[in-house]
Image (spheres, rainbow, N blue to C red):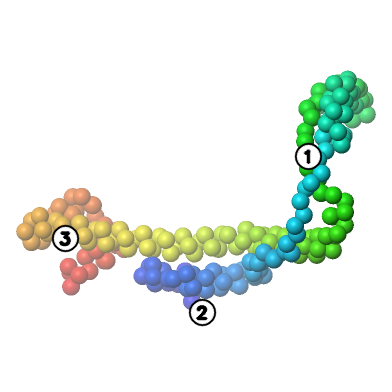
């Protein structure tokens, strides 16, 4: 059984999505984490419910007539308040003007429509609740396994970036060869002056064809 840490840079760089998933699943199994499948959103029954009733809200009270709401909005309404941060207590309440006197328009369903669709509403709620719970469990699983996935994707991306850099170095050396009309010694000097002494991992791949 080979883990992703047992792979060479060459092997990591060519992993496809299925390969990466294999090594992620393997690390999750080794870690003893219970896998959770991503839930599919439920297909809820369609309801043609429309909000056809209008009400007017002010001071938290709903009115059928806008004129009534406007009249109340002009009244001096009080509310019980307290200064918890000052006194440290909820018990010592005092009266203060309720200045939120804006009249807001809200739309509602009719009672008859809600009752007529009650069974469908209930069934949809059951399906949605089950999905929400499954999604919560899946999100917890994703969070718990994030470190594993980040490590594997990081290793793959690092390997790919490594070989991208190797290829760029090879191309640059070929460019130097062209500039020097094929003089390998001068081209190599150009390269060494530009890149310095390469680390062994890079050197053995950049020069492998030239030293064979």
Q: Nearer the viewer, mark 2 or mark 1?
A: 1
Residue that appears at 85% across and 28% down: 67
Residue that appears at 81% across and 49% down: 109
Mark 1 Cα within 10 Å, few/some/many (few <14, many 20+)? few
Q: Is residue 33 visible?
A: no
Which quadrant would residue 48 be assigned to in this image?
bottom right
Which disc is residue 106 wearing? 1
Reading the chain from its start, which is encountered first: label 3 or label 2? 2
- Horizontal placement of 128 versus 28: left or right? right
Q: CA distance from mark 1 to mark 3?
A: 73 Å
Residue designated by label 2 = 1
Q: CA distance from mark 3 to mark 2?
A: 41 Å
Comparing 185 with 21, the one in front is: 21
| Above or below 59: residue 122 | below
Reading the chain from its start, which is encountered first: label 1 or label 3? 1
* CB contact under 8 Å: marks 2 and 1: no
Instruction: Classify mark 3: helix, strand or loop.
Output: helix
- Horizontal placement of 7 versus 39: left or right? left
List x then y, in percent, for residue 152: 49, 64
Residue designated by label 3 = 174
Q: Nearer the viewer, mark 3 or mark 2?
A: 3
Mark 2 Cα within 10 Å, few/some/many (few <14, many 20+)? few
């Amino acid at each position: 059984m080979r883990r992703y840490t047992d792979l060479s840079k060459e092997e990591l760089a060519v992993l496809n999505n299925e390969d990466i998933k294999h090594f992620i699943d393997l690390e999750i199994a080794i870690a003893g984490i219970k896998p959770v499948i991503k839930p599919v959103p439920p297909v809820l029954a369609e309801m043609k419910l429309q909000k056809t009733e209008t009400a007017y809200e002010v001071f938290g009270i709903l009115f059928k007539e806008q004129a009534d709401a406007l009249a109340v909005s002009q009244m001096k309404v009080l509310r019980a308040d307290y200064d918890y941060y000052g006194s440290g207590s909820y018990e010592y309440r005092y009266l203060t003007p309720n200045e939120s006197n804006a009249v807001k328009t809200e739309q509602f369903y009719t009672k008859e429509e809600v009752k007529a669709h009650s069974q469908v509403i209930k069934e949809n709620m059951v399906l949605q609740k089950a999905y929400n719970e499954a999604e919560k469990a899946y999100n917890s699983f994703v969070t718990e396994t994030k470190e594993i996935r980040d490590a594997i994707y990081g290793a793959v991306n690092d390997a790919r970036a490594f070989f991208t850099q190797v290829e760029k170095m090879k191309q640059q050396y070929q460019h130097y060869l062209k500039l020097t009309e094929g003089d390998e010694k001068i081209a190599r000097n150009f390269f060494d002056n530009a890149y310095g002494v390469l680390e062994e991992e890079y050197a053995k791949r950049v020069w492998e064809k030239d030293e064979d």
